[in-house]
């Protein structure tokens, strides 16, 4: 299936809910996060509205469900360089292009490390519990553990489908068995058929020279 041309996504990312230590112990904290993605794919975020180039991403109460350590929720990202380092590490250990990791994260969670879907997918790369256990014993709401596990899953799929990105992404969304049952084609699921071109569009954008 050829990728459909989709309008560009807003250059906005969600990276983390920055939570004050005292509020985390007593009540949901109010998070305001501002961010954007530069033309070169660099991630920029801030909890201050001082930069007019940044757009408001989160302005809501954030329930802190995990333990608090050193004033931040466990695994919370504190700046964009931290995420960049995680993506770089995951890319090197799994031999998956960093641009592909960024593209999957952008579509799956819009860079929200605390995202949990209605189906139970967790974290930046929205890994289902069964899939996560195949590649990691870590906490999928920890950004590093999540991205490392997601990268290993992508490596597995790249090997299985011999580098065919459309099939790899279809399998990431619907499961490898669904792709195999469909005759090594993108399954006829509306979500999957929208997901594949959306990630490919992001991937091409990250690959494009600045």
Image (tube, rainbow, N blue to C red):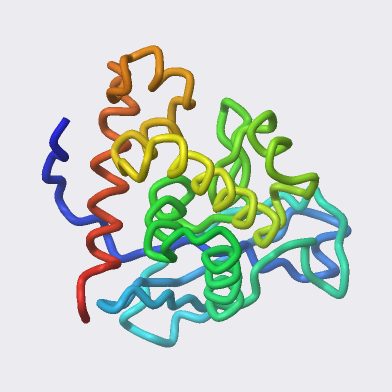
In the rendered image, residue 7, in percent from the top left (x then y), is placed at 15, 50
Instruction: Work out whether residue 125 or residue 187 is closer to the camera in this orientation and state it.
Output: 187
Split into 4 quadrants, where in the image is the N terminus?
Answer: top left
Count of marks overlaid on the render: 0
The quadrant where residue 106 appears: bottom left
Give the residue furthest to the bottom: 50
Tell which of 199 and 58 is nearer to you: 199
Residue appearing at x 36%, y 70% in the figure: 55
Measuring from the top left, give residue 162's x and y in whole percent: 37, 41
Q: Is residue 183 left or right of residue 178?
A: left
Left or right of 41: which side holds 153?
Answer: right
In the current view of this chain or complex, which residue is farthest to the top?
A: 181
Which percent across, then down, holds residue 36? 37, 72
Q: Nearer the viewer, residue 49 or 4?
A: 4
Q: Measured from the top left, where is residue 109 in percent x and y?
A: 48, 49
Question: Residue 9, located in which quarter of the rendered image?
Answer: bottom left
Q: Is residue 13 above or below residue 126?
A: below
Q: As displayed, is residue 89 above or below residue 166?
A: below
Residue at position x 53%, y 72% from top?
A: 88
Given residues 63 and 100, the one toward you in this image is 100
């Amino acid at each position: 299936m050829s990728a459909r041309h989709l309008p560009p996504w807003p250059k906005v990312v969600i990276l983390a809910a920055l939570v004050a230590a005292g509020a985390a112990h007593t009540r949901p904290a109010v998070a305001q996060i501002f961010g954007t993605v530069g033309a070169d794919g660099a991630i920029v975020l801030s909890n201050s509205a001082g930069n007019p180039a940044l757009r408001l991403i989160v302005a809501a109460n954030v329930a802190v469900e995990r333990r608090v350590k050193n004033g931040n929720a466990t695994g919370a990202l504190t700046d964009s360089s931290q995420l960049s380092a995680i993506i770089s590490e995951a890319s090197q250990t799994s031999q998956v292009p960093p641009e592909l990791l960024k593209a999957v994260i952008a579509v799956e969670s819009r860079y929200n490390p605390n995202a949990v879907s209605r189906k139970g997918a967790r974290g930046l790369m929205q890994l289902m519990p069964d899939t996560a256990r195949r590649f990691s014993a870590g906490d999928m709401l920890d950004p590093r553990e999540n991205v490392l596990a997601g990268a290993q899953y992508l490596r597995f799929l790249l090997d299985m489908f011999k580098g065919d990105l459309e099939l790899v992404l279809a399998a990431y969304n619907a499961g490898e068995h669904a792709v195999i049952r469909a005759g090594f084609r993108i399954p006829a699921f509306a979500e999957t058929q929208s997901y594949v071109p959306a990630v490919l569009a992001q991937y091409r954008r990250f690959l494009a020279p600045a």
